């Protein structure tokens, strides 16, 4: 439920909208960027390839008192991966606009 409903519908789109608000970009453009990243850049495949094994590992092998720290560590790497995917086309747009 978490990886197949919450992430694609509730958590990831607001991240793109927040970025658009910070950089004064239209929200519609942010949602189009999200859809593009899902369809063309494999955002959800990357999400699932990280979080499904991490969740399985966390609940099967990590002691209860280390689970929060484990998820925080995985989240750190997820934020790096999300940043790379979400900003992948932004650099190309800047070069085209500036050039």
Image (cartoon, rainbow, N blue to C red):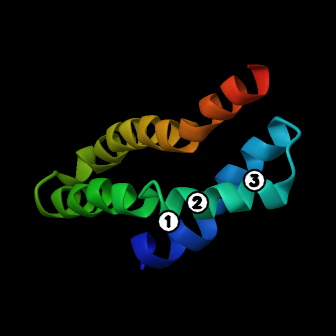
Nearer to me, 49 or 26: 26
Which residue corresponds to mark 2?
A: 36
* Residues marked 2 and 1 touching at CB (< 8 Å): yes
The residue sitting at 82% across, 35% down in the picture is 23
Answer with mark 1 or mark 3, whichever residue precedes in sequence.
Answer: 3
- Residues under labels 1 and 3: Cα distance? 18 Å
Between tags 3 and 2, which lies in front?
Answer: 2
Position of residue 96 measured from the top left corner of the image (x, y, whole percent): 70, 29
Residue placed farthest to the top in the image? 99
The residue sitting at 13% across, 63% down in the picture is 60
Residue 47 is left or right of residue 79, and the answer is left
Considering the numbered disc 2 on the image, is that residue within a helix, a strand or a loop?
helix
* Residues marked 1 and 3 touching at CB (< 8 Å): no
- Residues under labels 3 and 2: Cα distance? 14 Å
Residue 17 disc label: 3
Residue 48 disc label: none
Considering the numbered disc 3 on the image, is that residue within a helix, a strand or a loop?
helix
Which residue corresponds to mark 1?
A: 39
Nearer to me, 50 or 95: 95
């Amino acid at each position: 439920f978490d990886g197949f409903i919450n992430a694609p519908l509730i958590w990831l789109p607001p991240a793109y909208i927040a970025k658009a608000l910070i950089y004064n970009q239209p929200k519609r453009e942010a949602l189009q960027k999200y859809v593009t990243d899902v369809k063309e850049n494999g955002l959800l495949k990357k999400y699932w390839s990280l979080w499904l094994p991490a969740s399985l590992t966390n609940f099967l092998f990590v002691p209860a008192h280390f689970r929060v720290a484990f998820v925080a560590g995985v989240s750190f790497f997820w934020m790096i991966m999300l940043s790379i995917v979400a900003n992948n086309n932004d650099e190309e747009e800047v070069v085209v606009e500036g050039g």
